[in-house]
Image (cartoon, rainbow, N blue to C red):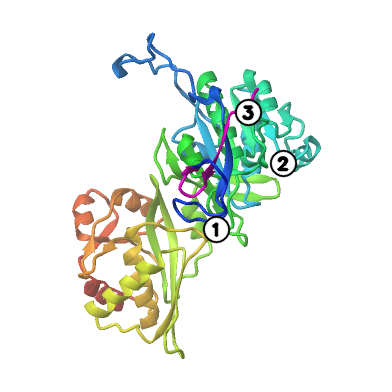
Amino acid sequence: MQRGKVSFRCSECLSVSLQWSGQCSSCSAWNSLSEVVETRHQAAIFSPKGGPSGISKICDISHENIQRRQTGISELDRVLGGGLVLGSVILLSGDPGIGKSTLALQLAAKQHEEIDTLYVTGEESSQQLVLRAKRLGISNLPIDVLAGNSLQSILEHISEYKLVVIDSIQALSSGNLTSLPGSVAQVRESAEAILRYAKNSECCVLMIGHVTKEGTLAGPKLLEHMVDTVLYFEGDDASRLRMIRSYKNRFGNVNEVGVFAMTGSGLQEVGNPSEMFLSRRVSDVPGSVVLATHQGTRPLLVEVQALLDASSLGNPRRLCVGLDAQRLMMLLAVLNRQSDVLVGAYDIFVNVVGGIRIVDSGADVALLAAIISSVLDKPFPRDVVCFGEIGLGGEIRPVQRGEDRIREASKLGYERVLVPKDNYTALETIEAQIIDIVSVSELVQWVEQNPS
C-alpha cells in the first residue's frame, strides 16, 4: 500500500500542520505534533447499512437482534449497563498494576465457552501470559491467545471472533506509519481500524489503555470520543479495594461503579460494599459519621471521619481525602456564619474510609456533622446515618435517590436517618425513624443534644 499524504496533528488541540514544528501554532503546546498518514481506505469508519443510499428511517431500523451478553462478572455487568453489546468498543484504563489485564483475562475465561474469544497481548509473550493465567487458576482453559503488536496481523486473525481483548492499544503498531508504537498517530490509526472492524462484524472489543503520569488517558483525546464506553480502574496502592467507574457509556448510565477486591488469585467481586466499608468502624469516637451516598444507581454507606486539632501555624491546614477540598472550604465558611461553632483556629483533616472517592453534594451534612462532632468532642450516635446538601445560606437541601439511601441504611441495621425536610416528605412510607433538619444551626443543635 502506498503511503498517503503526511501531516502532523497536535495531541492537545488536534489542529493539523503540513510540517513538523516544536511548538503548535494553534495552542502553543510544546512537542505535541505527531505524524499522521492519511490513507484512502479510512474515508469511512464503517460501511453504511440500510437502503441503497445508506439512509434509513429510525422507526424502520430493527434492533431486536442487538442484545446484551452478560459477562459472568456481575460487578462488570453493572458498570456496563447490563452486559456486553455486540459491535461495541470498550476502553478500560487505569494506573499501572491496578488490575486491568487481570480483569481482562478473567473476562476472557468467563466468555470463551459461550462465544469465540481471543486475547491479544502486545506487551507480554505467550509464556508470560500463561504464568499470569496460572496465578488466576485458569491456565488449563482453552483460551485463544495472539502475541504480537502488528495491527495488520491482528486484523487478519480476529475475523472469526465475537469477543476480542487487546492489551494494550498503545502497544499496537501500524505498518502504514513510521512513528513509534504509543504515539498519537499510531493510537489513532489502530483505534480507527479496530472500531471499523467491530462495527462491521458485530464483534465486541475490550481495549486496555495506559494513563499518563497526570492520570489522564495516554494518546489523543479523540480516542475517548471514538469508543462506545470508557471505564477507569481506580484504587489505592495501600488497599486491596478496586473500583471500576464508567465515565462514558452509550448503552448505560455513567458514573456507575463496580467494586472488587484484589487477592492472590485475582479480582474478587464485592457484592455488598457498604458492609465492607463499615466492617471495622469504631463507634463512640468523635468525628465519625456514616454517610448514605450513591455511586451511579448504587446506594452506598461509607464512614466519613474528621479530626480537628489546635493549629500552631498562622494558616491552619485543611486536608481532605476522598472528598472535594474546595467544597470543604465552602462548608467551613457556612458553619462559621450560620452557627456559634468556630473552627478557624484548627487544623482540619477529613477522610473517607476505604479509599473511595465521593462526588456527591449529598455528603455535605455528613461532612459537617463529623466536623461538629470532632470540635465538640462528642461522638455522633452510632445508629444514625445522614445525608443532604448544604447551601450557602445554611439551608439543607434535598438530594436525589433519597429513598434508595434510606433503604440501604435500614438493610444494614441503622434505625435513624437525618435527612433534609423535602426528602422526609417524599419518604413517609419508610418504616425507619426519619429525622428531618432544615438548617446548619439545627444540625449543630441536634449533634449537641444527641451524643452517642
Q: Amino acid at mark 3?
A: Arg
Residue 4 forms part of the magenta stretch: yes
Number of residues whose C-alpha sits closer than 10 Å to that of mark 3, classed few (under 14), some (14–19) or many (20 or more) = few
Kindly give the residue lying farthest to the front in the view shown: 19
Q: Amino acid at mark 2?
A: Glu
- The mark found on residue 123 in the picture is 2
Camera-side residue: 144 or 214? 214
In the structure shown, which secondary structural element does the residue marked by tag 3 occupy? loop
Q: Is residue 72 visible?
A: no
- Name the image quarter holding the N terminus: top right
Residue 13 forms part of the magenta stretch: yes
* Residue receiving disc 1: 214
Camera-side residue: 216 or 400? 216
Q: Amino acid at mark 1?
A: Glu
Range covered by the magenta-colored residues = 1-16
* Residue receiving disc 3: 3
